[in-house]
Amino acid sequence: MTPSRPGVTPARDGAIRSGRHRGTPVPDGGARRAGSLASVPRLSEVTAELDALWPPERAEEWDAVGTVCGDPGAEITRVLFAVDPVREIAEEAVALGADLIVAHHPLYLRGTTTVAASHFKGRVVHTLITHDIALHVAHTNADTADPGVSDALAGALDLRVTGPLVPENGLGRICELDHPETLGEFAARAAARLPATAQGIRVAGDPDATVRRVAVSGGSGDGLFGAARAAGVDAFLTADLRHHPVSEAVQQTPLGLVDAAHWATEWPWCEQAAAQLDAISDRRDWNLRVHVSKTVTDPWSAHHISGAPN
Ligand SMILES: [Zn+2]
């Protein structure tokens, strides 16, 4: 229950990865140069591979996935993965010399009539276009993919995935623990393994209850309580939980609820996705430099524990 310190970057090292650099990037686009193994892909070639990992047609109807800005013919040598396409990430991409940001959350979920730099989202667009940086989004298509966002979350906690939480749409994962532990120990595992945030981890339910099987779902998961109950798991790890759904859930069943910061539950996907693109880059001799942002973009900036209830 101890809150993590705000502003602390994710604990696990190795988050910033560099593609194996096998020579000077080829300056003449996708064409291979005699004597060089490496080629420089166009944005359209990279996004075609990303779309194969996370098919856009698998995104929810309300979602906005795909390329937000960028020239399909632009050369890509350096890619930055992040959860949120916010100003800090755009500036990080500029400082890094990235040509492409792959973000989990959309920049614009609804239509807009302006990208003027006087608006904070328009400012992001201007920063990106001014520095020739493309932005590509994989959101609910990455949630439902296999491996997807919840596989990365399970992997961060060293949980053994046995199947999807919602088989119909591929959302969430059911996992088994190697050894039974208490709900409190499971929450402590989440606190230790997920990147540090101001929120830390909250628990609803008996902290001493035994946990053997759990469900996990990256991002907002309070719409999946019914699925977690139906799956018969002992605990459910997700984010964005609210008073009434949680109150009713713990009154109804002994299901333990573990609530992490939304950003923290989705950040492990960035590492997983970066590794996937790294492997593609190797296979296609692209020589891409692939990075994962360690910038904490969870909007909550501080957490104060209130006095003990009487
Ligand atoms: Zn999310």
Image (cartoon, helix red, strand yellow):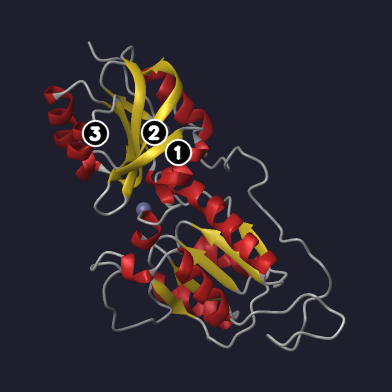
In three-dimensional space, the C-alpha distance between marks 3 and 1, rounded to whole angstroms, equals 16 Å
Image location (x, y in percent) of residue 6: 50, 38
Whether residue 92 is visible:
no
Q: Amino acid at mark 1?
A: Ala
Residue bearing mark 3: 231
Q: Amino acid at mark 3?
A: Ala
In three-dimensional space, the C-alpha distance between marks 2 and 3, rounded to whole angstroms, equals 11 Å
228 vs 118: above or below: above
| Residue occupying the point 83% across, 75% down | 24
Image location (x, y in percent) of residue 116: 39, 82
| Residue occupying the point 48% across, 45% down | 152
Whether residue 303 is visible:
yes
SS at mark 1? Answer: helix
Residue bearing mark 2: 175
Please tell me the numbered disc located at residue 276.
none
Residue bearing mark 1: 154
